[in-house]
Amino acid sequence: MTNLVEIRGLRKEYGAAAAVDGVDLDVRTGETLAVVGESGSGKTTLTRLLLRLAEPTAGSVHFDGADLFALPAARLRKVRREMQVVLQDPYSSMNPRWRVTDVVAEPLVTHERGMRGRGGRAKLRERVGELLDAVGLPPQVQDRYPHEFSGGQRQRISVARALALRPRLVVLDEPTSALDVSVQAQVLDLLADLQGRFGLTYVFVSHNLAVVQQIADRVAVLRAGKVVELAPARRLFAAPEHEYTRALLDAVPNPDPRQARRRVTA
């Protein structure tokens, strides 16, 4: 399997502290790589560097062979089409005064000239309708506003917007943490379905190991800006090697009180 992303020696300092400290990490084409760790471990900073929303103190990020931090503006603009993000709180990333059609169409209007002006309006609505259908929403909701939807529906709208430019990489930053358990499961099923249909590569950032176990192919455990363990998900959950990983797993609530007691006394 080829690497879509290659991160080498990545470091980001804020004052005297390093939020990301010498990270080496590959993201394989077509996989879901989960990045996990407690609050303050460096997950958000790492993803911002990956998307070139922040500049590193040292190190490199290569996307499909191109050094993101060495790209001129015109080339970077083209690469950004292939890298999209879905955030934790979809409502905060939407203009509440925009209708859904404008929210989902925003990347198309920004990056594709043929979608601008009066002539592009019909094309936009058709494309937005296709995207909404892909995430399980009827095209007829285009003219509604974000506040008219549930949290799960808004996250589906965010996913539709992320797919608008047919990206290769989607960074999912805590995409289910604001949802209840039943809606979480629906969104995870949707993400898995879309990955298969469109050949997507995911970087899934989360502190929820129960969710990670359902979706990840591999897991990178981040602590104080360093990757302390990297393994296939099945192996990591069955036999974690690093003490920090074991501590994270031990902190996951267990619905069976008998198993929970055995784990505490073991």
Image (cartoon, helix red, strand yellow):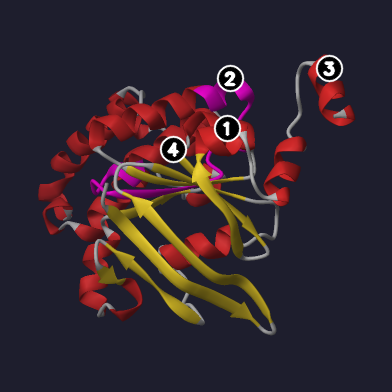
Evaluate if marks 1 and 3 touch, with contact meaning CB atoms under 8 Å apart: no
Is 111 inside the magenta-drawn segment? no
Residue 173 on image: x %, y %: 52, 48
Left or right of 247 in this view: 52: left
Q: Is residue 24 above or below residue 16?
A: above
Three-letter amino acid code at the position of disc 3: Pro
Q: Which residue does the numbered mark 4 point to in the structure image?
A: 217
Label placed on residue 184: none
Give the percent coordinates (x, y) of residue 147: 53, 36
Q: Which residue is mark 2?
A: 182
Question: Seen in the image, is 257 located left or right of residue 111?
Answer: right
Identify residue for label 3: 257
Find residue 14 and report its image quarter: bottom right
Q: Earlier in the sequence, mark 1 or mark 4?
A: 1
Q: Residue at x 42, y 70 (%)?
A: 8
For image coordinates 60% across by 79% down, the residue present is 13
Q: Which residues are magenta?
A: 161-185
Quadrant in the picture for the C terminus? top right
Residue kind at label 2, given as amino acid type: Ser
Q: Is residue 121 left or right of residue 21?
A: left
Q: Is residue 9 visible?
A: yes
Residue 175 falls within the magenta-colored stretch: yes
Q: Can residue 176 be spotted in the picture?
A: no
